[in-house]
Image: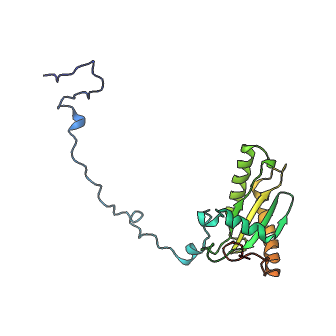
Amino acid sequence: MQPRHDGHRRHQRRLVPPADPRFNRPPFQPTPVSTDPRFNRPPFQPTMEHKKKPTYGFPKSARLRNCFQFDRVFRRRCSAADQWIVVYACKAHHEDNSRTGPRLGLTVSRKCGNAVIRNRWKRALREAFRLVQHDLPPAIDFVVLPRPKAAPQVAQLQASLKQLGLRLQGKLSIATKPPPGLTVGGKKEKS
């Protein structure tokens, strides 16, 4: 006996005869545990060697995210430059920086080119910072400005960030006194 089926109703499910072998499968049986020693290894236990490897992520805590943080770095007026980028730096305050590593802020102006070129700059700078963040001095906020009419590779930006970061660390250690009007948190003193 054939099941009833209306051919003009496409949205209805087709009925399948109960004798179809695809629907008479036995219930799922999990495979038994193998006795082969290659498959019965103990779970991975991290050692000190595994814990020492640096992570190369770029979380939100490694970025400058609001205008107060950018203003504090620019007001510090401690900068270094080379043929590719200009880097401003400022020591991070403990309220702003819960992590101990450096933080990055990017300022790419329209002088560098159209939106495609500016986004390419930002991607390249983020990648270079992500790869060299463990070589940069800790607890320092960096704001990076690319030079117009330059188009470096990520490897060149990595070398620039390392070199300029060390140069800025020396400048910041010499001049530890903040400029007048600058307080913790980047807000101006009330006069």
Instruction: Give the left or right position of residue 37, taking residue 18 as reference.
Output: right
Residue 125, image quadrant: bottom right
Instruction: Give the left or right position of residue 88, taking residue 14 as reference.
Output: right
Residue 178: percent from left, percent from top: 77, 78
Judged from this view, the residue extending furthest toward the right is 83
Q: Residue at x 79, y 45 (%)?
A: 113
Judged from this view, the residue extending furthest toward the left is 1
Residue 28: percent from left, percent from top: 25, 49
Q: Disc count in the image?
A: 0
Between residue 104 and residue 42, name the one nearer to us.
Answer: 104
Residue 97 drawn above or below residue 26 = below
Q: Residue at x 22, y 34 (%)?
A: 21
Coloration of the structure image: rainbow
Between residue 164 and residue 78, name the one nearer to us.
Answer: 78
Residue 140 drawn above or below residue 109 = below
- Regarding residue 116, the answer to whether it shows in the image is yes
Instruction: Give the left or right position of residue 26, taking residue 82 as reference.
Output: left
From the image, which quarter does the C terminus lie in? bottom right
From the image, which quarter does the N terminus lie in? top left
Residue 190: percent from left, percent from top: 71, 76
Judged from this view, the residue extending furthest toward the front is 191
Residue 102: percent from left, percent from top: 68, 70
Q: Residue at x 74, y 63 (%)?
A: 143
Residue 182 drawn above or below residue 29 = below
- Regarding residue 59, the answer to whether it shows in the image is no
Residue 85, image quadrant: bottom right
Between residue 51 and residue 108, name the one nearer to us.
Answer: 108
